[in-house]
Amino acid sequence: MIHARDLARTFKTKAGSVEAVRGLSLDVAEGELVAFLGPNGAGKSTALRMLTTLLPPSSGSASVGGHDVVSDPAAVRRQIGYVGQGTQLGPLSPGARRAGKPGQGAAHEHDGGSEARR
């Protein structure tokens, strides 16, 4: 389902080059769950952004669902769902306001959520 070989991403900075991901190789079969764990700056988000076609790799190759992330990104995107770390899912996010809180009626977007407050 997900195959990556020697995936790498280098960013250019004023101070020089920074290797965010170096030589990532992995195979994830259909139905397997995988977690990327590591300290801040370890390249977890960069690796996922490459695998989801949001960021092109500097080198290496990857395919998701049998489709190459560089040559066929549209097909990859049709196969996946991705919620990045910057997505607001807290109680004040727009999605949470529309859905209402447990025990309350669902808010309706057209009225700014007023029904959930009644």
Image: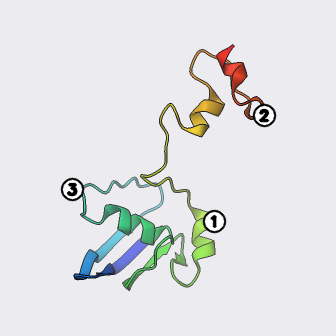
Q: Of marks 2 and 1, which one's residue comes earlier in the chain? A: 1
Instruction: Identify residue type, mark 1.
Output: Arg
C-alpha distance separating marks 2 and 3: 42 Å
Q: Give percent across and percent down for residue 106.
A: 69, 24
Q: Nearer the viewer, residue 50 or 79?
A: 50
Amino acid carrying label 2: it is His
The structure residue drawn at horizontal position 56% and vertical position 85%, both measured from the top left corner, is 71
Mark 2 or mark 3: whose residue is earlier in sequence: 3
Q: Secondary structure at mark 3?
A: loop
* Mark in front: 2 vs 3: 2
- The image quarter containing residue 74 is bottom right
| Color encoding of the figure | rainbow
Left or right: 87, with 25 as reference point? right
Q: Which quadrant of the rendered structure holds the C terminus?
A: top right
**Circle 3 residues within 10 Å: few <14, some 14–19, many ≥20:** few
Q: Which residue bears the numbered disc 1? A: 78
Specify the farthest residue to the right: 110
Question: Quadrant location of residue 39?
Answer: bottom left
Q: Which residue is mark 3?
A: 39
